[in-house]
Image (cartoon, rainbow, N blue to C red):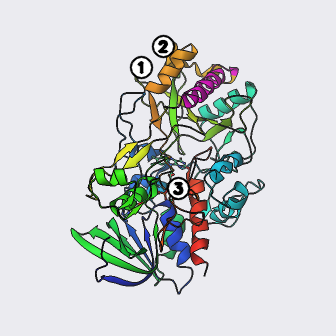
Amino acid sequence: MHPVAAGKRNGVDVIVVGGGTAGCVLAARLTQDAGTRVLLLEAGSATLPDAVTHPPSWPSLAASGAGWGDTTVVQRVSDAPVALPRGKGLGGSSAINAMVFARGHRISYDSWSDHGAKGWTFDHLLPYFQRSETTTGGAPGRGTRGPLAVAPAKQPNEVLLACLDGALETGHRRAFDISGGLEEGFAPVDLNIVDGRRQSAADAYLAPALDRPNLDVVTGATAHRLLFDGRRCAGVEYGADGRTHTALAAGEVVLTAGTIGSALILQRSGIGSADDLRQARVDVLHELPGVGRNLHDHPRANLVYQAQRPVPAARYNHGEILGLLRSTPDADGPDVQIIFIDIPLPNPVAPVQNGFTIGISPMRPKSRGSLRISSADPYAPPVIDPRYFTEEADVRAVVSGITTARRIAWSCALAGWGIEEVSPGLSAVDEESIADYTRRYFASSCHPVGTCTMGEDEVSVVDSELRVRGLDGLRVADASVMPSIPSNDTTATVYAIAERAADLLRRP
Ligand SMILES: Cc1cc2nc3c(=O)[nH]c(=O)nc-3n(C[C@H](O)[C@H](O)[C@H](O)COP(=O)(O)OP(=O)(O)OC[C@H]3O[C@@H](n4cnc5c(N)ncnc54)[C@H](O)[C@@H]3O)c2cc1C
């Protein structure tokens, strides 16, 4: 138990820990009520590299000061660690991500009730999806008055349009709105880009709220651990300017430090699996075996093509068109994503100067891993083990997707580009060699979720109202609470979770 010391920052109702995607939403929504005083703590900076605003520059950002620079432990299937970037600074991962904005297909939220989460189906989330966005395409079920102005690229890269034509030519459906959670097939996806510039959570939500007298934002503030008064979370101990500070909350503390950050803060505070905590020499305050468990993500295998015709330079985010499809006819919904990317990503075979990539991911992966602190030191690197592709079903989903992607690549629509598949090329033609390529040379799509799973059973960390089970005054409201990953990129779902968390916190 960490005693509550006299705090420098008192008079706060809610402390929001982590000024990323969800944290910016919470800080902005809660301070709409002038009587609620909010303190937002963010480990990174308020000033991010200029490249953040320039959409095609996003692949360079993970290695900049706007990223934490995490890697996983050596993965069993590939015998190599995998880079797992996450954002650091106001806006968090929404400030460095690839800006794809899409809901999972509605069916992928159904399993959220498996461990007892109540009221989190797609239909329950729909008002919150809508509240976050402004769309103009007229698709059913989309929002028209939210802070995020999202839309597909007006003129997607020509090579990506050829891939879309190839998908239709090979029998796939043209979706009207692949971002809305209701359709399968291929289409240009919505992007968080406004007037040619990235729109992060800090731009859309936090910036308009910064002048409010009831909002205090402290950057360069790394939360070390939570402070407790009995079973009630009373505040946060954090480091800033080389010193240790204390902030106390009269109401609640909300963790929005992301799938990696939130679970680590709980563990450093003595909340987690007793074995993990003892290994890190942290006293057990409250045993919750699910903290750090259920870590999963969308891994991605890449097919890399060289083209004879010059591929036009990217104007948007590189990945402007994608497809959601089923790996087998009896799947109950889409479980594979195929994304067309207008640059040749690094590959294990040979460098490609002019070309493009087709990325293939299992969108409802079964592989599960874990996350744990290596010590009580808040600045020590964590032990991240997603155990990618340890479930063979995930490999098979990608193999099916690669077969589909290759049919698209060899369609008449792409014939004029004079393409050659460089990676894997002829080294992977039969099912087993394609599976082997998938296991050995995948990357992360950087969508980790699940380390503070929501539910009502013993492996759940938060209940259906996002309260940490068995404690008072403490919630988690970010990507970590997703019991299973939605079948599309994750940001849109994080925005919806945070919008809903604001409602839960406002309730008297
Ligand atoms: C490179 C990359 C590309 C991606 N591409 C896409 C995409 O195109 N589309 C999509 O939908 N999703 C994408 N994602 C995933 C998506 O961005 C995330 O799922 C989502 O933004 C997570 O939101 P969050 O609020 O849970 O966490 P984050 O947005 O990561 O916010 C967590 C915040 O907490 C802060 N923090 C952490 N620990 C502490 C601490 N101890 N004290 C204080 N602050 C702390 C962090 O610095 C960060 O600002 C991508 C992610 C990355 C990294």
Q: Quadrant of residue 349?
A: top left
Q: CA distance from mark 1 to mark 2?
A: 9 Å
Q: Position of residue 12 (x, y in %)?
A: 42, 82
Q: Position of residue 350 (x, y in %)?
A: 40, 20
Tell me which amino acid carries mark 1: Val
Range of residues picked out in magenta: 391-412
Tell me which amino acid carries mark 2: Ser
Q: Position of residue 255 (x, y in %)?
A: 45, 65
Towards the viewer: 152 or 489: 489
Q: Is residue 250 above or below residue 371?
A: below
Q: Residues within 10 Å of mark 2 (few under 14, many from 20)?
A: few
Q: Is residue 269 above or below residue 425?
A: below
Towards the viewer: 486 or 323: 486
The residue carrying mark 2 is 427
The residue carrying mark 3 is 458
Tell me which amino acid carries mark 3: Glu
Q: Which mark is residue 331?
A: none
